Amino acid sequence: MAEAERVGEVIEAGTTGFIAQCYELYQMPPLGSLVRTGGSAAELYGIVYNAATTSLEPGRRPIARGRDEKSEEAIYHSSPQLAKLLRSEFEALVVGHKEGDKLYHRLPPQPARIHGFVYQCTPDEVKEFGKSFDFLNIILNAHLPVPTEELVAASLRRMSRAHDDQRDFLVAAGKELAILLSGNLNQLNAILGRIKL
Amino acid sequence: MSERLGIIVSGSLAKGVEVRLDSSASIEDMAVGRFVTIEGAKRRFFGMITDVSLGMTDQRLSLTPPDVSDPFIAEVLAGTSTFGTLHVSPSLVIGGDATTMLEGPQPVKTVPSHFSVVKAATQEDVELVFGTEDEKRFSIGTPLDMETKVCLNLEELVKRSNGVFGKSGTGKTFLARLLLIGILQKGAAANLVFDMHSEYGWESRDERGRRVKALKQLFPSRVAVFTLDEESSRRRKVSTDFVVRIGYDEIGPDDIALLRQTLNLTDLAVEAVHQLSRRFGKSWLEDTLAMKGTDELPEGLNIHESTLLNLQRGLETVRRLPFLMPHAPDNTVSRILEYLDRGTNVILEFGRYTDITAYILVANLLTRRIHARYREATEKALGEDTTPPRPLVITIEEAHRFLNPEVASQTIFGTIAREMRKYNVSLLVIDQRPSGIDSEVMSQMGTKLTCLLDNERDVDSVLTGMASKNELKSVLSKLESKQQALIFGHAVPVPVVVKTREYGSAQSYRDFAPDSQTEKDIEKLWD
């Protein structure tokens, strides 16, 4: 089993989601990817729905520095302090948790703990999580700053990569969506258009 | 393991239940007339698909259809947003409660609960419902897409009058022949067939021009062929047992009354027949024809000249029938009864005389007398506490001529259809215009076997009195035009669409008449 990659640390947490900061600038997990945090007692699963790189101090915005530089890398090279003055964060929507060995696709009883390590899930974990599509309902009902269709499509596309038969997985997910979105044809069509291979 | 089709989503006992198809089951594989089982929480139900339809969760889908050229989208939507629905009418409970365990399938009195699983019926289920071939049951064919046999309970069948219907060329004759073979094979009753087109006794050709054997060839020792037209029989190399001749003196006024329409007689003329026969006695027909005018009428008879002319013209048509003669050398009725009493089945061929006048006259005349004898025998058996006569099945073609509302009350066939069950005589009615048959007679029929019918009125009249009439209507009108029939009534526990049993191959003949000696004899004949 592949070792899970550590991608950050929780810096803000609520019942429905958490914000984590990356250890390295720009090293946030991709949109829609499945991450987990917490110890063996209560493991939380989240789907990355938003990421941002901002100044460390909210009041101080970075200024443009590249006028005399040849390339982007050169800016960071000549101002090494930048990596410390900026930070990359990502937000994850909690879509499930694990108690003992059992995986539940619903909100956890407790939110994540601050400074909890956040790991990118391995393909095996993704596969196990993808056995049920109950999490789709959580995403569809969440009020997020990103378009829901985009997030659903991104997470399904990403999950499908962990499966041997991507198409089968996507068709099954599509059918689940068709039931959930039976009253919202446009949204359904938008998602289906984004997840087809 | 039977394939799962879907789940029950709504319905009622009166109208049947709606089944939503699973996405794995293709609606194009469904067919009306197929059997399904429904696994209720406590009972198992048995029913038939009576309609297939398309549904969708959102009406907007039909207004702005999705891009189904993309197989992914098509696959996702199939069974979720768009789905197939089946209309199933449950008709039997085949398992689950004590009565069913002990006494076999029972009629339904309730519907399965919500979301009960619906599966295609397995061979075992169908066997459980229709039984297996034994000394009482005769296999008439197989259900759609199945190998199991559908068996008719012939003992039940011959207790009541039955009908075989269908448009011309849909296989009525074959179906009727199968039934007759079944009755013969199981010895359920004696048959008397009024064979208008000479197809039941000896070989004839099917629509593809193949020769097919008929009853006399399959059961030589148990079938007697009577003929009205000796010449035609001889030309076709039929070995006949008796040549039927009918004397003028055997024709009664009732026989003429039935021919009123065919002979174009007026009501007054029919009335005059009664008067004349009262006056002249047995020789009334000859005497009437011999008269030159009303002045020759005997005293006391008041018949108008035009009426007499009308009557004479009609009677002349009758007298021209070649098998009629002043005095018959032998009594046909006694001969027929003799054969029937011995358990031999009688087929009366009409040869060239396919004219409806001849058919109605002969069939009615003979049946009336046979009926009287049976009635006597049954009453006697009742009084003396002996065994009643063997059940008799009389087969008539073009039945709407005998049983139309105008004459059904007068003809003997109407009487038989209505009440002769008590005297062990029943009818097998073969007809292509069931709407022409009196509704009272139709409603008394025990089992109806119907091939394709497309005339609305015919369909309606065949299905009169059925609880699930509307459902069966769609089944009936979608039958294939060959080798398929819908059977419902007493002899089958549920209405069933069958692909009729093969008829015409050497193997089929062996199945019908397993008696090896007979078979050898037949083979010899054919070599």
Image (tube, helix red, strand yellow):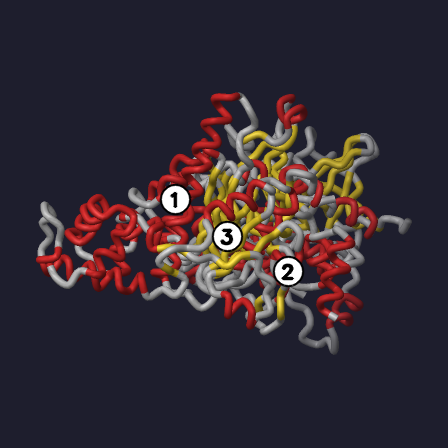
Is disc 1 placed on a helix, strand or loop?
helix
Please check whether the numbered discs 3 and 2 fall on a single chain. yes
Q: Which is in the foreground here, disc 1 or disc 3?
A: 1
Is disc 3 placed on a helix, strand or loop?
strand
Disc 1 versus disc 2: distance between alpha carbons? 33 Å
Three-letter residue code for mark 2? Tyr
Q: What chain is tagged by disc 1?
A: B
Task: Give the number of marks.
Answer: 3
Contact, mark 3 vs mark 2 (Cβ under 8 Å):
no
Q: Name the residue under label 2.
A: B503
Q: Bin the neighbour count of mark 2 within 10 Å (Cα to Cα): few under 14, some 14-19, many 20 and up.
A: some
Q: Which residue lies furthest to the right in this view?
A: A1
Residue drawn at point x = 12 percent, y = 61 percent: B293
Q: Is residue A169 left or right of residue B100?
A: right
Q: Bin the neighbour count of mark 1 within 10 Å (Cα to Cα): few under 14, some 14-19, many 20 and up.
A: many
Residue drawn at point x = 56 percent, y = 66 percent: B68
Three-letter residue code for mark 3? Val
Q: In this view, does A129 lie above or below B233?
A: above
Residue A71 sits in quarter: bottom right
Find residue A101 and report its horizontal and vertical position in percent. Answer: 82, 33
Q: Is residue B442 above or below residue B436?
A: above
Q: What chain is tagged by disc 3?
A: B
Q: Mark 3 points at which residue?
A: B193
Please check whether the numbered discs 1 and 3 fall on a single chain. yes
